[in-house]
Image: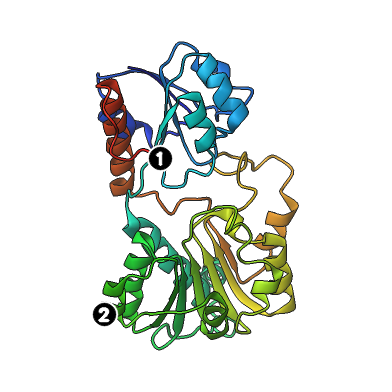
Amino acid sequence: MQVSIYSVRGYELPFLSQALDEDHSVRWLTEALGPATVELARGTEAVVLFTNDTADAAVLEQLAALGVRYVAVRAAGHDQVDVEAARRLGLRVSYVPEYSPYAIAEHAVALMLALNRQLRRADAQARQADFRLDSLVGFDLHGKTVGLVGCGRIGGVLARILHGFGCHLLAHDLAPDPELIRRYHLRYVSLSELCAAADIISLHAPLTPATHYLFSASQLALLKPGAMLINTGRGGLLDTRAALAALQSGHLGYLGLDVYEHEKGLFFADHSRDAPDPLLAALLNHPNVLITGHQGFLTREALTNIATTTAASLAAWARNEPAAHEL
């Protein structure tokens, strides 16, 4: 099969090239898919996309006109693809539902610990030979209440990790898992009850019209004063301006982000010489904010699973068989 892979980055190239080996003729593209780059897929049967590509109805129509028949998303999040439009156009769409829930869950814990123990500030002070402890007081995770918003594969792994810390666990999810209740004494509650009780909240819900700005100004106002909010899910789950206002007022104590609602065109590239995103710059200037550039998935194990699952989907399509993870 002839395949165009968009938004290719150096860190994933060895994994993708090894998984695809000689079964496909691959066009490696560093450009993101969008209206201006659709033409790059001319002559290929399939396109492979990542998180910040754009595959809305207009782009999909252009792809179909070029002869593209398959769209493989090499990520779990697939809100960048208009799946209904794809079906209407006869395009089949696959994704990678699980590449490493451990990678994301462990990154969420890393953000929690780094914020709580003031590691960003401690590192900056130590580099100046300033070893005073006055501004570095944290708190024990043991005994704290952590709320998981979205408790599927990633949330379940995070529940296991936090249970090991001795945390009390709350969850809000449309499909409660009895096994998590049994193993980790997790309680499923309403979102408002979770917000009022949790010392730390971690977001792992998918981004849908119903979950966009799930944490708006009104929802943030329900948080326990001084609470920590972690988002390794999707940027659009959080109204970032409302979160900044809550930080500035002191109501929100800590904010850890691996995703950002305006990350498209920003993350995965060097913008050090560009004019800064003013909202992101304001967040980064806050001492109790830690932001990573959508790197939660970035482990060798996850990259291997993304590549092999994507290759398996393309191989199934080439045999005219349904892929295991079609939408």
| Callout 2 amino acid | Arg
Measure the C-alpha gap from mark 2 to mark 1: 31 Å
Residue 313 position (above or below residue 198): above
Would you say residue 114 is visible in this rendering? no
Q: Residue at x 61, y 80 (%)?
A: 223
The quarter of the picture where the C terminus appears is top left
- Binning the other alpha carbons within 10 Å of mark 2 as few (below 14), some (14 to 19) or many (20 upward) gives few
Q: Which residue is mark 2?
A: 182
Image position, residue 44 (x, y; %): 43, 15
Query: Where does the image place residue 205, in percent across and percent down from the top left?
Result: 48, 60
Query: Of helix, strand and loop, which one carries label 1?
Result: loop
- The answer to whether residue 247 is above or below residue 198 is above
133 sits to left or right of 142: right
Q: Secondary structure at mark 2?
A: helix
Task: Report the residue marked by disc 1.
Answer: 327
- The colour style of the image is rainbow
Nearer to me, 248 or 73: 73
The quarter in which the N terminus is drawn is top left
